[in-house]
Image (cartoon, rainbow, N blue to C red):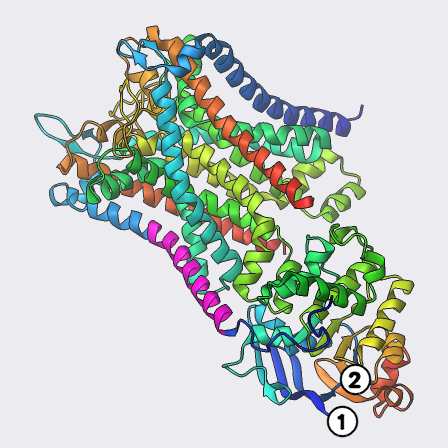
């Protein structure tokens, strides 16, 4: 399988606190990687390192490399803005902009310099379809995004991310604030999106990781303790501590 | 009709690359320059004051200026440039205004945060803001037409333009600052303190006085210092309501002339670039230092307060 | 009622008394100015020139002068203040230079207005050879207003949730794009309101214009930005302290005070209406 993203001896610091220690892992094309671990283990930090969203935090510092298609995203000459477009992100709390549903999805296209209205309209429709939201909103595209339910808002955020045609999709506990039905919808969506994107999803819900991911990574205290095919991690983990976490003895 | 092959990547990978990077750099730089302007203004004020004050000290001794007991720059016999009378006057009206504004301000803040109901609070906030929005010259005017005659009658003095009048007016001007910052400080005292005290059988009043006010003390002190800064720097009210006699003040019921009002009165009458003119800038420099110090101290107090509450 | 309850009763009444003193103060001020000022105000008062050494006639040139100076103040203070707020809230990190900027803002807001007046005399009137005029006064007031507009604009920027910024950055917006398209549109109403409130304060200031351009008695409208002008606050000062027959012009002084307060409150009111409308438009 092709490697899409590769972390190589990656360390990360907030001021003097070391948040990630020596992370090395390969993430393959068209797979879903679930990242699990107790809170504060560095899983969200790792996710945000991949599209350099940590840059906006003062006092953040890194060592080592993360590569996308062999290209170092921490290279000095790299275009951070371009990296963020290629690596989409869905946040823990859905964050629609205070615009209409249409404008939310079109936003990414507009800031990337696309002016052709008919193209934008088609792209918005396609993205909403891909995010399994089109049928619910097609009659009220000009209504405020805040009128949508929590689950719809989160799928809108996914549609918004899809519109700019990313290659990788990062999801930071995308269903943590949603009810079971909405969660199920998001999970089905992730399963469908897998054919086109590499997806990395942080979750605190073990069952969810087991259901949707092909590979599972277990983080603890900023270290990557276990990374393997999901079924193996959940049935025959190589480390005792992973087993303890998965069976709910701590966490 | 679909004109594009939607499924294909039509966005080039490096779209806008050069453009967005340059506009980003340029806008960052412009905003940075904009931020530096603020430092420039502060430094500029300081430098201009210093350079305009320096010529004064070619002829006036600094010690005589700072400790001289007489200010008489236009005397035909012997010009005197001592600012002690103004310092004393400024000190008097400021002290007087704080004596009035601090208890009333803190009392009102405590009333709003702990006694009044939500409706009263909503109703009072704009009123305090209105008080703050009244121009100082109007307050000064009221000092002449309202407070002055009142003081003259009560204390049986020929006219009411004196330090007491100035103190009352400055208190009115300092009140909004003291009330709103003290109220914020009282409201941000953690609820747990209050509940612990109430659970021990203290009344609400005892809790306010013995727990909440001490806990909010540094915020309240900072509020009073800011109010004091305003009182010291205020020009128009003291200019209009304190009588403006440059002699050493004898009592609160006599006329006084503060640092600010002396500048305001005399700069209009003095010829540019004379000894007297430069001396007025030296007074401005003294004022700048005093308010700078007060700001610094209140900032340190407020910073300490923020640290405690985090 | 036991001793403790009695203590609470007295204590609360003490606080209530403080509160009523504040209310009473505002009531007395408003009553005095409005009841006596309203008698002097009629159409002639606000639409004609002062006559006869200011013992008769209106305050039109003072109204126009104040408005013109405030416009100059706005032209200097609003863009600079907003820009500076954008820098410290969006770009600046916690470096020394940022702390220096913040310290400067706090100190500038504490500098007495008369010191700004001195600064204006040296910089604008003398050094830049603008002379005593509307422009000098407006620029002096503009510098004085700067820290207020910065603080108000920063508050408005802070109220925009970070998720808007992160959301657009994650879609590949550059920093400036993110600010321009996804922060400023939501912050502008608050920024405008805050800065206009600052301008209202500036419009009522007297000390900075005393020596930079305000004139005693000019019974005609200012011809250009380089002419001296009458201003409402300065006019009130003159009418109540420097006029040769103070008691005779007292009603006119009251009228001037009322017009000044009305102007300041009108600007405040305008700011609030503006915020309301911009908010409503955004919601649609």
Residue pointed to by mark 2: A31
- Relative to B5, does residue B182 appear above or below in the rendering? above
Closer to the chain start, of discs 2 and 1, is: 1
| Identity of the residue furthest to the left in this view | B77
Mark 2, other Cα within 10 Å: few <14 / some 14–19 / many ≥20: many
User: On what subunit does the disc labeled 1 rest?
Assistant: A
Residue pointed to by mark 1: A1
Q: Is residue B85 magenta?
A: no
Do badges 2 and 1 share one subunit?
yes
Magenta span main SS: helix
Q: Nearer the viewer, residue B119 or B102?
A: B119
Marks 2 and 1 in Cβ contact (< 8 Å): yes
Mark 1, secondary structure of its residue: loop
| Identity of the residue furthest to the front in this view | B1
Mark 2, secondary structure of its residue: loop
What's the distance in space between the residues labelled 2 and 1, CA to CA? 10 Å
- Relative to A232, does residue B284 appear above or below in the rendering? above
Q: Which residues are magenta?
A: B18-42
Q: Quadrant of the C terminus of chain B?
A: bottom right
Asked if one can make out residue C264 in the rendered structure from this viewpoint, the answer is: yes
């Amino acid at each position: 399988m092709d490697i899409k993203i590769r972390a190589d001896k990656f360390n990360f610091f907030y001021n003097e606190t070391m948040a990630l220690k020596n992370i090395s892992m390969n993430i393959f094309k068209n797979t879903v990687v679930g990242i699990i671990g107790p809170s504060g283990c560095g899983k969200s930090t790792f996710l945000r390192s991949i599209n350099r969203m940590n840059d906006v935090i003062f006092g953040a510092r890194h060592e080592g490399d993360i590569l996308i298609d062999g290209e170092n995203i921490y290279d000095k000459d790299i275009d951070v803005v371009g990296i963020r477009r290629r690596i989409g992100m869905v946040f823990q709390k859905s964050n629609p902009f205070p615009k209409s549903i249409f404008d939310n999805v079109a936003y990414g296209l507009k800031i990337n310099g696309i002016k052709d209205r008919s193209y934008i309209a088609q792209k918005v429709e396609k993205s909403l379809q891909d995010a399994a939201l089109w049928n619910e909103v097609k009659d009220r595209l000009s209504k405020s995004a805040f009128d949508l339910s929590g689950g719809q808002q989160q799928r809108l955020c996914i549609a918004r991310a899809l519109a700019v045609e990313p290659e990788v999709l990062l999801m930071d506990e995308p269903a943590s604030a949603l009810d079971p039905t909405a969660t199920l919808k998001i999970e089905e969506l992730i399963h469908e999106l897998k054919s086109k994107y590499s997806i990395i999803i942080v979750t605190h819900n073990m069952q969810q990781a087991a259901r949707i991911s092909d590979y599972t990574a277990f983080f603890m205290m900023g270290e990557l303790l276990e990374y393997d095919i999901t079924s193996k991690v959940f049935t025959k983990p190589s480390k005792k501590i992973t087993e303890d976490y998965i069976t709910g003895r701590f966490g | 009709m679909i004109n594009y092959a939607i499924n294909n990547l039509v966005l080039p990978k490096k779209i806008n690359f050069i453009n967005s990077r340059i506009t980003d750099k340029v806008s960052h730089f412009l905003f940075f320059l904009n931020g530096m302007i603020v430092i420039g203004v502060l430094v500029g004020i300081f430098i201009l004051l210093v350079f305009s004050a320096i010529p004064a000290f070619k002829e006036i001794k600094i010690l005589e200026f700072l400790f001289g007991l007489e200010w008489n720059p236009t005397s035909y016999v012997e010009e005197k440039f001592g600012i002690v009378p103004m310092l004393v006057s400024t000190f008097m009206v400021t002290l007087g205004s704080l004596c009035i504004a601090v208890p009333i301000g803190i009392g009102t803040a405590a009333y709003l945060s702990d006694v009044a109901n939500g409706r009263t609070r909503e109703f009072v906030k704009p009123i305090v803001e209105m008080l703050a929005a009244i121009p100082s010259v109007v307050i000064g005017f009221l000092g002449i037409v309202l407070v002055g005659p009142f003081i003259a009658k009560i204390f049986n003095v020929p006219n009411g333009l004196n330090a007491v009048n100035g103190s009352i007016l400055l208190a009115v001007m300092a009140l909004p600052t003291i009330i709103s910052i003290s109220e914020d400080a009282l409201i941000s005292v953690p609820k747990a303190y209050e509940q612990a005290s109430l659970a021990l059988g203290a009344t609400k009043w005892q809790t306010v006085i013995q727990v909440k006010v001490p806990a909010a003390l540094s915020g309240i002190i900072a509020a009073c210092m800011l109010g004091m800064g305003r009182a010291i720097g205020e020009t128009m009210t003291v200019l209009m309501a304190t009588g403006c006699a440059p002699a050493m003040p004898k009592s609160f019921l006599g006329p006084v002339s503060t640092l600010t009002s002396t500048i305001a009165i005399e700069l209009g009458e003095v010829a540019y670039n004379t000894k007297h003119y430069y001396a007025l800038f030296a007074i401005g420099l003294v004022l700048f230092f005093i308010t700078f110090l007060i700001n610094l101290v209140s900032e340190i107090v407020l910073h300490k307060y923020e640290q405690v509450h985090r | 009622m036991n001793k403790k309850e009695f203590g609470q009763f007295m204590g609360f009444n003490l606080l209530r008394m403080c509160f009523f003193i504040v209310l009473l103060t505002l009531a007395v001020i408003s009553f005095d100015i409005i009841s006596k000022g309203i008698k002097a105000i009629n159409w002639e008062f606000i639409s004609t020139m002062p006559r006869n050494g200011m013992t008769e006639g209106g305050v039109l040139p003072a109204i126009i002068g104040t408005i013109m100076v405030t416009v100059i103040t706005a032209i200097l203070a609003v863009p600079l203040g907003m820009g500076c707020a954008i820098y410290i809230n969006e770009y600046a990190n916690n470096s020394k230079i940022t702390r220096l900027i913040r310290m400067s803002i706090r100190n500038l807001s504490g500098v007495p207005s008369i010191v700004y007046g001195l600064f204006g005399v040296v910089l604008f009137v003398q050094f830049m050879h603008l002379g005593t005029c509307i422009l000098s006064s407006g620029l002096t007031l503009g510098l004085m207003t700067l820290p207020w507009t910065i603080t108000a604009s920063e508050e408005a920027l802070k109220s925009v949730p970070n998720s808007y910024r992160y959301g657009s950055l994650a879609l590949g917006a550059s920093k400036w794009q993110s600010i321009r398209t996804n922060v400023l549109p939501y912050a502008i109403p608050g920024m405008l309101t805050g800065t206009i409130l600052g301008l209202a304060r500036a419009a009522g200031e007297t000390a900075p214009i005393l020596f930079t351009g305000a004139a005693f008695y000019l019974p005609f409208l200012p011809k250009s930005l380089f002419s001296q002008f009458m201003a409402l606050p300065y006019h009130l000062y003159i009418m109540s302290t420097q006029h040769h027959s103070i008691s005779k012009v007292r009603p006119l002084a009251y009228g001037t005070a009322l017009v000044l307060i009305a102007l300041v409150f009108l600007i405040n009111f305008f700011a609030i209406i503006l915020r309301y409308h911009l908010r409503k438009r955004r919601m649609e």
